[in-house]
Image (cartoon, rainbow, N blue to C red):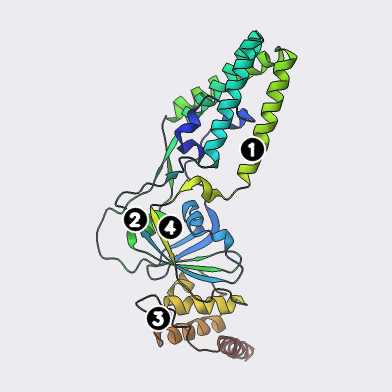
Amino acid sequence: VAALSWFFLLPRLVPAPQALIRTSRPERLEPTTGKVVGAYSGGNRDYVNYLAHLLHKGNTLPAYSVRCQKVTSTSTSSDVKAKLFGPITWLSILGFFMSTALFGLAIGLNDGFALVAILALSFLSTLVGIGNRWSLKLRKRVANRAVPPSDVVIKYPNGSFLIIKCDEYTARQLYWHPEECEYMVGSTVYRAISLCGTLILMFGVICLGNATLNLQVGFAVSYIILNAAYWVVAALPPQWNWDLSYYHVQRYEGPEQMQTFTEALWKAIAITQTAHWVEVGSIAPVSKGWASWIKQAEERAKSEPAVWDEKDEFRGFPEWDYNAALTENLDAASSANTV
């Protein structure tokens, strides 16, 4: 996310600058483990897109919880970007002032080697920043044909469920299409920048080794402070660095914490009023007993009004002894197999 901001191009000191000099660049944002299934569309993904995970704060969902949210866009053009003055931006500003202070100190002490080292290591970050500068591309829906309802169910590895009510445009941007990185320069130019960056880094380190003791101590203190600052920012929630105001998330009020996976699955079916996504996403164990229970759960969910009314007021979940029903179906399937 740092390379989304223009502050990333500031000439500055950065800890471990060699980490920015890579042979290749990621083509998309890294997804999160989870299962994404279209509640009615039949879509299926074995991962959760990075922005969707950030937007819904999926890492905060307790085990066996069920949460329902509604996502809408707040403007006509997508504009998901880095926060102008997020924590990562302040790291860039801190590194710039560290570099400026050392530059002034090198001039005051007439240390030529330190001056060259500061210039080399500072403008290295600008050069590498040009090679890594990118913008986020969220694909838009082109066709306008009729499609099934676009609600999405996300199942996380801890057995929690997240049901999202949204339109087709939002569903495709957040859950179905990959989040592609559009870089400012091409691959050939990037490799040339990486080569130049490597040479500049080596030259800067050699000059730093020949600087006076006072400037070497100044560099050491600066890098200690920067490393501590980068560590603190890395421990902060990633949402602090992103501007996701393009999307508005409404959370439906109601009980969310369940005791078992079976209860969580039943409540998720009750909210969507369909079990089609359970089969498509291979959410439940595959057996005759479970298949019978899932069919009964869907029939029971459809026989009752929606969990939330038209005013988004919580009505309550349908009354059904899901545990007894599951035991009965599993026992029946076991007896049939025994015979």
SS class, disc 1 = helix
Front tag of 3 and 1: 1
- Which numbered disc, 3 or 1, marks the residue that appears first in the sequence? 1
Q: Which residue is mark 2?
A: 74
**Residue 302: which disc?**
none
Q: Which residue is mark 3?
A: 306
Q: Is residue 281 left or right of residue 148?
A: right
- Which numbered disc, 1 or 2, marks the residue that appears first in the sequence? 2
> In the orientation shown, which residue stands out farthest toward the right?
213
The three-letter amino acid code for the residue at tag 2 is Thr
Front tag of 2 and 4: 2
The Cα atoms of the two marked residues, 4 and 3, are separated by 24 Å
- Which numbered disc, 4 or 1, marks the residue that appears first in the sequence? 4
The three-letter amino acid code for the residue at tag 4 is Tyr
SS class, disc 4 = helix
Which class describes the residues within 10 Å of circle 4: few (<14), some (14-19), or many (20+)? many
Q: Is residue 248 left or right of residue 285?
A: left
